[in-house]
Amino acid sequence: MPTDLPNLLTLSRIAAVPLLVALVALRTPWGDVAACIVFSAAAITDYYDGKIARERQIVSGFGRMLDPIADKLLVGAALMVMAGSDRLTDWTLYPAIVILLREILVSGLREYLAGLRIGLPVSRLAKWKTGFQMGALGTLLAGDSAAAVLHLSFLPVSLIGEAMLWVAAALTLVTGRNYLVAGLRHAEADSTGRAAEAGHEPAIRP
């Protein structure tokens, strides 16, 4: 049901997207602090909605459909609003592109495999990728401006976020390749099966 707690947590991630964009658009240090908090809180719900759903055995089709959508909306919005407000340097723009392209690739694979009634399970490495990615984006949203108002200027916050984003991009390439190989394997098996069925079809006689 959409009103189950895990689904409500998932919906809260989607609801956080316009708030996140508005806070970054303020271009103020405290706005950056608030944006980091909103993003981090939304990212944490990604862990708890799945955990609660498994523990309470209330896994639903609605949740399985909406969960990856909410994640991609949150990540995509964070990357685009930072790029649009010149918060991403040339050094961080490239890993951001890699991450966005990987999300599109995996979405396409999931849609194709869903037609074959085949799931694409999340690997352990993909979970590490998500952890680095969410940590990097939260850190970049805070940036050095948030560090200054929180009296943490001694920390190179933006540099830390950039380094984490590159690690996330590297993991993104590895996991994206793994998903692509799995998708191509299933596609080949499907094509072979269809060809075999076509070869055994009886001839149509006049």
Image (spheres, rainbow, N blue to C red):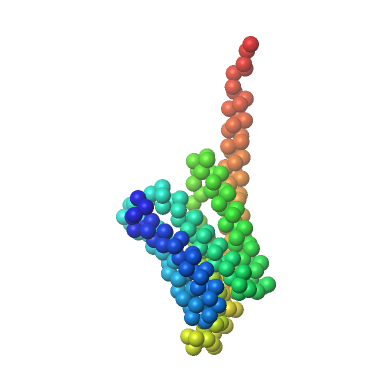
Image quadrant holding the C terminus, namely top right
**Viewer-nearest residue: 36 or 163:** 36
Q: Residue at x 45, y 65 (%)?
A: 16
Q: How many marks?
A: 0
Q: Can see residue 183?
A: yes
Q: Residue at x 57, y 48 (%)?
A: 109
Residue 17, position as x, y percentages in the image: 49, 64
In the image, residue 36 sits, relative to residue 170, either above or below, namely below
Q: Is residue 157 visible?
A: no
Q: Nearer the viewer, residue 77 or 200?
A: 77
Q: Which percent across, then down, holds residue 107?
A: 55, 52
> Is 17 or 177 nearer to us in this picture?
17
Residue 128 placement (x, y as % from top left):
51, 64
**Left or right: 27 in relation to 51:** right
Q: Residue at x 52, y 81 (%)?
A: 29
Vertical placement of residue 72 versus 37, above or below = above
Measured along the vertical axis of the image, is residue 193 above or below residue 111?
A: above
Give the residue furthest to the top. Answer: 206
Q: List the single residue furthest toward the right.
A: 90
Horizontal side, residue 61 vs residue 196: left or right: left
* Relative image position of residue 59 (x, y in whole percent): 37, 51
Quadrant of the image occupied by residue 99: bottom right
Nearest to the observer: residue 110 or residue 15: 15
Residue at image location 45% in from the left, 53% down from the top: 66
Identify the image quadrant of residue 11: bottom left
